[in-house]
Amino acid sequence: MTPCPPPAGAEGRGPAQPKLWFLFPLRQASGSGWPACCRAGTEGHSDPCCPSPGTMCSPFRASRSFLPEDCQELLLPPPTPMAYIPGGGAPGAGATPLGSQHCVCRVELSVSGQNLLDRDVTSKSDPFCVLFTENNGRWMEYDRTETAVNNLNPAFSKKFVLDYHFEEVQKLKFALFDQDRSSTQLEEHDFLGQFSCSLGTIVSSKKITRPLLLMNDKPAGKGLITTPICSLPVAWSAPPSPQTSVVTMAPSQASTPASCSQRVQPWLGWSPRIMIAAQELSDNRVITLSLAGRKLDKKDLFGKSDPFLEFYKPGDDGKWMLVHRTEVIKYTLDPVWKPFTVPLVSLCDGDMEKPIQVMCYDYDNDGGHDFIGEFQTSVSQMCMARDGVPLELECINPKKQRKKKGYKNSGVIVLRSCKIHRDYSFLDYILGGCQLMFTVGIDFTASNGNPLDPSSLHYINPLGTNEYLSAIWAVGQIIQDYDSDKMFPALGFGAQLPPDWKVSHEFAINFNPTNPFCSGVDGIAQAYSACLPHIRFYGPTNFSPIVNHVARFAAQATQQQTAAQYFILLIITDGVISDMEETRHAVVQASKLPMSIIIVGVGNADFAAMEFLDGDSRRLRSHTGEEAARDIVQFVPFREFRHAAKETLAKAVLAELPQQVVQYFKHKNLPPTNSEPA
């Protein structure tokens, strides 16, 4: 039997629908070791070898493989400190990065079910679950679980693990089958039902409920179900191929309901359901240490020592693995090293009791650094150090200890403070309940041309789209998964409005100033198309009113005690900004708020001014000289993506957004709404 197509809607009837529970922890593909060769070069310590080829990750991007030639010598003259950069970013000059700071987040899904259909005559169904992912409009089998024999309430032990990419719509389909034969071909097994959604919907909601549906879009069982999560329905255009288990999908013509609440159905008795919950498994704790030395051994003939420290943890092969090196402090026996921060998982694999070996050396230009002493400790012991209550650890040279009677130590390492806190990621904030508040600003100035003329940028072609709509869809289809009510303000600027035909640079395109909200991306597109015949394109191209409009709401959100809301303004325009000084000032002020601005330039105009606002190369300043607190503007010219896949524009437009969200909340020291203490 061929796999069943996904539903065009989520509603169903009858009292016995199957239900599944999807419990998926999230973990970060950061690895447990250094992606570089580590050579201790110390007495009694063999060289930890380079890791085998594995995966180096970048944030919300596809990973790349690294090879042994990527490795770097860790103990070169002079030794450079390893720098951990909280929240990502490039390390300072001369710093050696501690592993991959920007990592793809991985999502693990655990599947269980209840009240599945019974397709066997003499026994119960033998269900297994198949996960499909969408690639270029086609469903491809990604993985499948084991088979649960004679079980209508299975709990599958096999997990589905996927990379999570914020800037992509990652569509998933879970299909259940009753295994009848040993064949791997799905058409040989009885279909039990399926469920479709995006990975972003799951991640942003933490927990959703859904029914399983059959081939005819009817429930795989009976009864009505509450479905508080809205998603765009899909329609099938072809059945799956028996050879490739691939199905082609096309967007359904059905429109999105006015709001999620309107889709909620009443409960009738006991309602079976699919349940998906999210949990972060990655250890996001980091540890900050402040150390000094006292009366260390003198190693230089005509001077004192030049001490530095190295921290090691036990590797899987039983050898010590270098995880951090401090800077060298010249000409002193009483060094004070700069405080440093490392991920707890890098220092001790998250195990507070795991031994940590600390080696102290005197730096030599020829690379033959002199061993001063060593000691072992653990994070649990180091946590005894607090501000004002240091922890003193004797630095021991085993050779001297064996040879010299009365040997005490080769100095003392003083741990001045030890602090552990959480280095929250973008996913931590999303899973913690942060809502992305999306607003669209559309340019209706005369330079766009008459919307009835095919040469106009606002002309809607026979396919029902134009560059404005393409930009709205590219950004909106991603963002809408991260807003619970999916109601988005849509504003216009640069047009004359009825009945007095005065120019407005801040008007609701649905002509309802008290309620400018549109229901989902569909609602924005419908309001945009409906308003075109009722306005007159005019000018000038002023950005500051709309920037200030969103900034007023973002300013109210600064009263929040946790990371609850972040505002995103998408401006789509065709030309040069008329009020550049006012816009620069507005952007600089907005940089202090939980807010980002995305500008998409349509047409072939000169967008040099937009590049100026996008402070990638240098920090933006207002006309008064005030510098922006951070870079919050991302500009992308649409013309560079006219012939590219539609997903490419979304990736370029949203590439910087996760970093901007994390940067703001960390700067304000705001934890996720539902966060655990370190």
Image (spheres, rainbow, N blue to C red):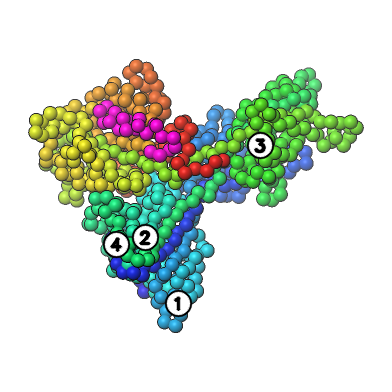
Q: For the C terminus, which image quadrant?
A: top right
Q: For the N terminus, which image quadrant?
A: bottom left
Residue lying at the far bottom in this picture: please name it.
122
Whichever of labels 1 and 3 marks the residue nearer the N terminus, that label is 1
Name the residue carrying label 2: 210
Question: Any magenta on residue 180?
Answer: no
Magenta residues span 544-565
Name the residue carrying label 4: 11
Q: Counting other residues with Cα less than 10 Å from the Cα at mark 4, is it few (<14), some (14-19), or many (20 or more)?
A: many
Whichever of labels 2 and 3 marks the residue nearer the N terminus, that label is 2
Q: Which SS class for mark 4?
A: loop
Left/right of residue 138 with respect to residue 107 in the rendered view: left
Q: CA distance from mark 1 to mark 3?
A: 55 Å
Callout 4, which amino acid?
A: Glu
Q: CA distance from mark 3 to mark 4?
A: 54 Å
Q: CA distance from mark 2 to mark 3?
A: 46 Å
What residue lies at 40% left-to-right and 22% top-to-bottom? 627
Which of the numbered marks, if any, corresponds to residue 124? 1
Whichever of labels 1 and 4 marks the residue nearer the N terminus, that label is 4
Callout 3, which amino acid?
A: Cys
Whichever of labels 2 and 1 marks the residue nearer the N terminus, that label is 1
Q: Which SS class for mark 2?
A: strand
Q: CA distance from mark 2 to mark 1?
A: 23 Å
| Quarter of the view holding residue 242 | bottom left
Q: Which SS class for mark 3?
A: loop
Q: Which SS class for mark 1?
A: loop
What residue lies at 41% left-to-right and 70% top-to-bottom? 116
Classify 272 as above or below 477: below
Callout 2, which amino acid?
A: Arg
